[in-house]
Image (spheres, grey):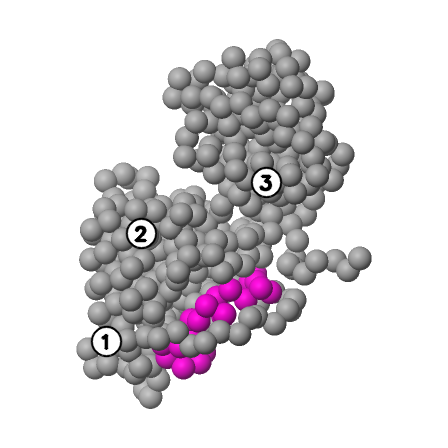
Amino acid sequence: MLAIGLLGGCATEKAPSATRAPTVVTPPPEAPAPHQLTSDQPSFTRLPNMTSGHVPIRVGIILPLSSGSPATRALANSMLRAAELALYDSGNRDLLLLTADDTGSGGDAASSAQNLLDQGAEVIVGPLFSQSVSAVAPLARDRGVPVLAFSTDVSVAGSGVYLLSFLPQTEVKRVVTYAAQQGHRQFGAMIPETAYGEVVVRAFQTAVAQSGANAVDIERFNPSEGAIVQPAAQLAKANPDAVLIAQGGQLLRGIAPTLAYDGLSKDKVKLLGTGLWDDPSVSREPMLIGGWFAAPDPDADAAFVAKYRATFGSAPAQSQLAALAYDAISLVALLSSGEPYRRFTRAALTDPNGFAGVDGIFRLGLDGTVERGLAVLAIAPGGAFQVIDPAPKTFQRPSS
């Protein structure tokens, strides 16, 4: 349980916090949602240094702090610290952060959510895993409390659950749309036979169709077996001029040379990627040089990482994910004015103007998914990621 005063020793320079993006349109009208609570309760958590006469903005956060995976624990601790940093940077002394653990079990997540709700949480940030979000959602929904989760599984979004994560759908749409604008008309794809791959397939087909281009072939492969030779040869027969490879890591570095062997080298087709390409190891494969993928600007989170390092003595684990926790608390702080238990309405959270976060602009949809303004990056000779089409600064469409 953390109050703003606990971080008083932090440096005074602020990292970028969530702010409103330029106005586009007026949010749709919304009837007030019912809530079991209409006023502050004596049993709710309050700290002695909270402003008297005000109802604290109690924010619950659920993270896998005791996960059996050391990497997951490190990420969870970085996200919690990022949330603390946003709490301090907000300058709002009425914000109260209530922490709860999630081991990755749906039952544990549900117990944590119930505990936070019993303490008077008006909004819940997290969890990280889809099964935990599914367990938390009905409890929060019964109390009229929105959930700002970090899962990438869109099946858990909606009905009060909003995803702040980086969704592959947005990445695929951005890079395919840009490629079509550059004149590519015949799109092929190499996509893994995984749940992630299923999401990418649907996004790819939709993006290609919306761009007025053609999906000439989609080849699936088993990533666990590394079986890419036959799918690559089959794809080459379709003669695409752009190929989306929804894979990262070592297997990606094997797919590109295999495609080149079959006649789909980087000088004949444009190779496209998803957010899995946003990895320095990608640059080790010469056949990927010149390829495009969508991601935040490489320097977008520099100020956040610098502030985090100055405060805690080291960089965050997986800075892009840690920044999501910072954005979540910053968004809560931005929307915290107004009547208690009525301030985090659907209309406020889904403001079509969007918000400006650490990694660029974002907005939450009525279906609970997130749309992000991403840049298109190219893999340059020497391994650097070069911005070839900057991320948008607003969701407002340019006038024709």
Magenta stretch: dominant SS? loop
- Residue 95 is inside the magenta segment: no
Residue 150, image x and y in percent? Answer: 40, 51
Q: Which amino acid is tagged 1?
A: Phe
Of pointers 3 and 1, the one earlier in the residue sequence: 1
Q: Secondary structure at mark 2?
A: helix
At 27% from the left edge and 38% from the top edge, which residue is drawn? 69
How far is mark 3 from mark 1, CA to CA? 47 Å
Range shown magenta: 337-356
Asked if labels 1 and 3 touch by Cβ distance under 8 angstroms, the answer is: no
What's the mark number on residue 349? none
Residue 339, image x and y in percent? Answer: 40, 82
Q: Is residue 388 left or right of residue 74?
A: right
Q: Secondary structure at mark 1?
A: loop
> Dot 1 corresponds to which residue?
44
The answer to whether 135 is drawn above or below residue 381 in the figure is below
The answer to whether 92 is drawn above or below residue 188 in the figure is below
Residue 80, image x and y in percent? Answer: 35, 56
Query: Splitting the image into 4 quarters, where does residue 195 fall?
Result: top left
Q: How many marks?
A: 3
Residue 65 at least partly seen: no
Of pointers 3 and 2, the one earlier in the residue sequence: 2
At 51% from the left edge and 64% from the top edge, which residue is drawn? 350
How far is mark 2 from mark 1, CA to CA? 25 Å
> Dot 2 corresponds to which residue?
134
Q: Is residue 223 left or right of residue 179?
A: left
Residue 260, image x and y in percent? Answer: 63, 15
> Dot 3 corresponds to which residue?
206
